[in-house]
Image (cartoon, rainbow, N blue to C red):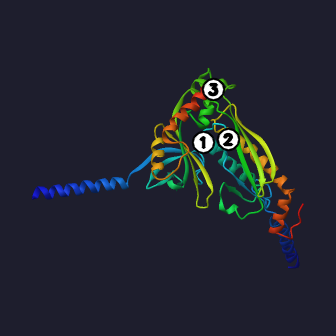
Amino acid sequence: MRNKGALLLLSILISGAAIASDEAASTSSQAEQVIGFGDIKRNTKGFLELKDGILSFTSDKHNFGVSADSIEDVVTRNDTQRAIRGTAGTLSQLAPYGAGRALSLLREQIDTLTIEYRDLNGALHGAIFTMPVGNAEPFKKELLAHRAQTTVPLKQDSTESNRISEAKESQQ
Amino acid sequence: MMRQNLLFALLVTIAGFSAVPQLVAQPHPAGRVKTSTSIEVKMIKAGEVSVPAEFQVALYENLLQEIETKGGFQAVYRDGDRSAKNNSNLVLMDATITGFQEGSEMARQVTTVKGATKIVVHCQFTDTKGTILLQRDVEGKVRFFGDNLKATQDFAKKAAGVADDALSAYRTNPEYRSAAQQQSPSVALP
């Protein structure tokens, strides 16, 4: 009898923990807001999170979010960017003895997450985020699970980005 | 005492004169006087060209920002904005990408002659009745420095200039005249 009681208590605890983890389920990543998310300045670094169907971006000065079901298109892509960016990156090209050119070759892989969403007035906005490689796809999956829409189904995304990079290489 | 009163009256008059220009015209921070015409910018269409989604979005967002900065229009509406529906004094901008060549930032930095990114966008401006006011191909490029998305900023700056030309074309249009008359019947039209 005592064993049965302990078992019941254990099962209640486990199911409770499962419900709690479901409620707190969220996708998050360090990200850079390139353009278009609310009034946040372009190229702002911060934290992107999808929680309870709300996609929100938080930086030191800003916090903005949109509901996943207001998103009409979500597309991911894999790309590269300069490892040394901004003024330092530009000035590094002036380094002597071809060192600048060598520095230009240093590039890092990034993921791009592009969304189109409508505000309460029906106006269409577009926003672009970059984030560490491998982080954009989970966002897309979660957004689609929360009734966001896409013009590029999940499997096609990687094929699409490969096709574009192949075309890019053949042009060079 | 009388001299002091005279001086005071003089100061008041000077202050009054200096305040007059502020009451007469309220120029936009960019130095331009806004018209009563607004513009609705539609989402950039990819047409038959394969363009990454981030380029489309960056073209649209940069364009909106540039047109707002130029300040020629009273209001700049986004695609689908319900506030634009009741505005008859409105120019509509449709843009379709007709050419896209994605270059390589690395190739630009290494060779300085290769790897340019180029976008060609066909821009069409109409009034609310669908009359075409102006259509033009606008090109955006990034040749030496900067990432590929900089081509979208180059396009936006040029396209905002074309939007100004469309505004001038609209102001000679009968649609504008009737819309402006409805808004303020006493205003003399050019």
Q: Which residue is mark 2?
A: B47
- x and y percentages locating residue B105 in the rendered image: 62, 31
**Amino acid at circle 3:** Ala
Query: From the viewer's perspective, is B94 left or right of B181?
Result: left
Is label 2 on the same chain as label 1?
A: yes
Label 1 element class:
helix
Query: For the residues carrying marks 3 and 1, which lies nearer the camera in this image?
Result: 1
Mark 3 → mark 2, Cα distance in angstroms: 28 Å
- x and y percentages locating residue A12 in the rendered image: 23, 57
**Amino acid at circle 1:** Glu
Label 3 element class:
helix
Q: Which one is earlier in the sequence, the residue at label 2 or at label 1?
A: 2
Q: Residue furthest bottom?
A: B1
Q: Which residue is mark 1?
A: B54
Q: Quadrant of the C terminus of chain B?
A: bottom right
Q: Which chain does tag 1 point to? A: B
Q: Residue furthest top?
A: A97
Q: Residue at x 84, y 74 (%)?
A: B8
Q: Which one is earlier in the sequence, the residue at label 3 or at label 2?
A: 2
Q: Which chain does tag 2 point to? A: B
- x and y percentages locating residue B12 in the rendered image: 83, 72
Q: Which residue is mark 3?
A: B107
Q: Residue furthest left?
A: A1
Write down the quadrant of residue B122 in the picture: top right
